[in-house]
Image: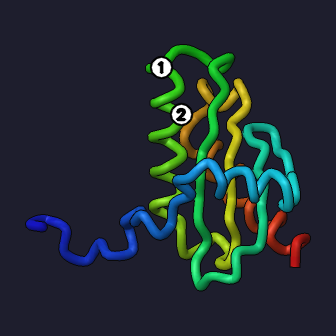
Amino acid sequence: MPGHAGQEGMTFPRVARLVRRGEFDAVYRAGKRRSSSHFTVFLRANELPQSRFGVSIKKALGGAVVRNRIRRRLREIVRHHRREIPAGWDIVIHPKSVAAKAPFAALTADLLQLLQSAAQAGK
């Protein structure tokens, strides 16, 4: 694609996503749960060379516009920081209601810290 040179590390390919309900269910069933001020994450070791991510947002957080905005922001955090997030995990992220109005920098710092500490605790 024109204009995308040097951004190979900035993509969010399908292999880095949880897409099927069964994949989400496996993480909920066999995974560990950790929480922070903005998120609850569920992690399960996946035996793969990369981590895979899924986002689940309750309707109680707001209408479609609000939920899609949260989803876009989370995808952007993961896309930019995939190399900093420990590999070998299936991760489902549940944002809390405060995430809708939180500054992007606060969300980024909170999510990265939560994922790194949860992965360390899970090893």
Mark 2: few, some, or many residues within 10 Å (few <14, many ≥20)?
A: many
37 with respect to 97 (left or right): right
x and y percentages locating residue 88 in the rendered image? 68, 78
Left or right side of 11 for 61: right
Q: In terms of sequence position, does the residue under pointer 1 or pointer 2 come before the other?
A: 1
Q: Does the image show residue 121? A: yes
90, 38: nearer the viewer? 90
Residue 45 % position (x, y): 76, 73
Q: Where is residue 115, by image quadrant?
A: bottom right
Quadrant of the rendering where the C terminus is positioned = bottom right
Residue plotted at (88% across, 72% down): 122
Q: Residue at x 74, y 38 (%)?
A: 38
Q: Tag 1: residue type?
A: Ala
Color theme of the render? rainbow
Residue 64 - label: 1
Residue sitting at 68 percent across and 65 percent down?
A: 90
Q: Which residue is mark 2?
A: 70
- Check the image and report above or below for 119 versus 92: below
- Work out whether residue 114 can be spotted: no
